[in-house]
Image (spheres, rainbow, N blue to C red):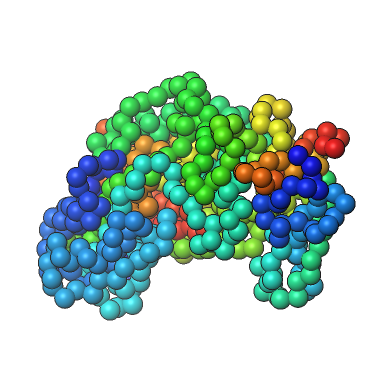
Amino acid sequence: MSETTARFVDDSLFVPEAEHVTLRGARCGACRTTTFPHQNSCPRCGGVDMSEVALPRAGHIWSFTVQHFEPKAPYRGQQPFEPYGVAYVDLGPVIVESRLTESDASAISIGDPVELTVIPAFEDTVTFAFAPAGSAS
Amino acid sequence: MKVAIVGIGMHPFGRTPGVSGRAQGAHAARAALADAGVTWSDMQFAFGGSYSAGDADSLVSDLGLTGVPFINVYNGCGTGGSALIAARSAILSGEHDLGLVVGFDKHPPGAFAADPASLGLGEWYGETGLMLTTQFFAMKIQRYLHLHNISTSTLSTVAAKAFANGALNPNAWRREAHTPEAVAASKMVNDPLTQYMFCSPGEGAVALVVARAGQAHRYTDTPVVIESAEFRSRRFGSFEVFSPWLSPDSAPGPTVEAAQAAFESAGIGPADVDVAQIQDTESGAEIMHMAETGLCKDGEQEGLISSGATEIGGALPINTDGGCLANGEPIGASGLRQVYENVLQLRGAAGVRQVPGNPRVAFSHVYGAPGISACTVITR
């Protein structure tokens, strides 16, 4: 599935027309807090001077797990269900929760370098995910 | 002036087909009233709540239409703790002398369903499989074990202790002991947590009769004094469930502040605690909460747990009734279950699971979504 032709699960999560898929956050003009997704006010200082920011595309695993059972609705995944990796990825200004391309817990460690890619979500949509650094095209 | 707990009542936890959550609440209330030797018409006020089993104040239809001011509390996992705090304040304010606190619930089997929109999150968060409480617990303990060099086998030991204590508790849901090996070998749910390391939503009810401490001996020979009861919500930077992102500037969770406030307000330190009931939504939560409450330091848990210090006969008995792991989590009742167990222990009435040495100070702690904690210190 190509990054450029697939439909995103939610367009507001991504920087429009980026060369490589890039997450869209917000940065507070007052306290510099970075949020993901973009939001219109700052949860730290309550400020409303929020500007769009492209988040770094590479980071490292902050913590992780593997989802072994099929979630209830509103989950809409591929059938049949296959376990999938989930992590918090430290991107520097913000730590983002994300799917992983890896689903074997023994192959994942805290501190592993990862980079952004997309994976199939449901129907013809894709969502963001992190892959081991150097593995994503 | 202080407030005392003079009566306690419980409906057994677990699954009771054909008995509504409200009926279980009424059962617990009647038991607490009988324990204190009082009647419903003696109650000057009541605070109560459930999350999904109806309005607590509708219990007046079962207990009697006495005109009593009955205030509903709806505060998630903090419902019981919040109701107790409100009741204590009602007496401390001088407004009342005697009242009832009740919490009950009845949840369908399986994990709680989550609705992204109700929390201000996009549909994508649920659709792509990120909106699961179990993932949060797994990732929180995964990082904690890594940072503090604690082995995953400690998770199994915690669960095995809970089931061993539950086997001694006639009101518990899970009354079958499991070895740590069996816990580790149960179905993997979210690495590093297996099925037997998680509690389940369940059913049950607890009620307490509280009184002005100076009048407590009218109702019981064994009053237990509420030295403190404190509630806190999260601050920016705390790692909580359903967070699409975290700040690199991390802050302690609400447990830390609630526990500190409870100990300071009581003038009693964590080292003085003889028995503790702390939130064990899963095994890792008990480990992390031992340190967040101040009962030990980060990283000391594995040594304490593997040496048996947290067992009923140990130096720091924790979750002596089997905790959430053996009792399940009926949200409205869960926090009051902890206080019920602590009262039993301080009365010396806990039977085969009695903590030896005449415990004098008991601590309880609840934690829940979306980042709240309530703690109490009670003494005899």
Q: Residue at x 45, y 63 (%)?
A: B230
Tell me if I can see residue B89 in this picture.
yes
- Report x, y in % for residue B8: 23, 53
- Horizontal side, residue B289 vs residue B324: left or right: right
Q: Quadrant of the C terminus of chain B?
A: bottom left
Residue nearest the observer in this picture, B192 or A72: A72
Residue B332 x %, y %: 34, 55
Q: Does residue A16 appear to the left or right of B365 in the view shown?
A: right
Image-based side of A1 in relation to B236, left or right = right
- Residue B288 shows in the view: no
Residue depicted at 22% across the width and 42% down the height = B17
B183, above or below B371, in the image:
above
Percent coordinates x, y for residue B316 in the rendering? 45, 39
Q: Is residue B266 left or right of residue A16?
A: left
Viewer-proximal residue, B367 or B91? Answer: B367
Residue in the image at 28% along x and 79% along y: B95
Vertical side of B66 occupied by B218: above or below: above
Residue B368: % across, % down: 48, 53
For residue B325, what is the image quadrant?
top left
Which residue occupies 29% across, 40% down? Answer: B14
In depth, the one of B145 and B192 nearer the eye is B192
Quadrant position of the N terminus of chain B in the picture: bottom left
Figure check: A101 above or below B97: above
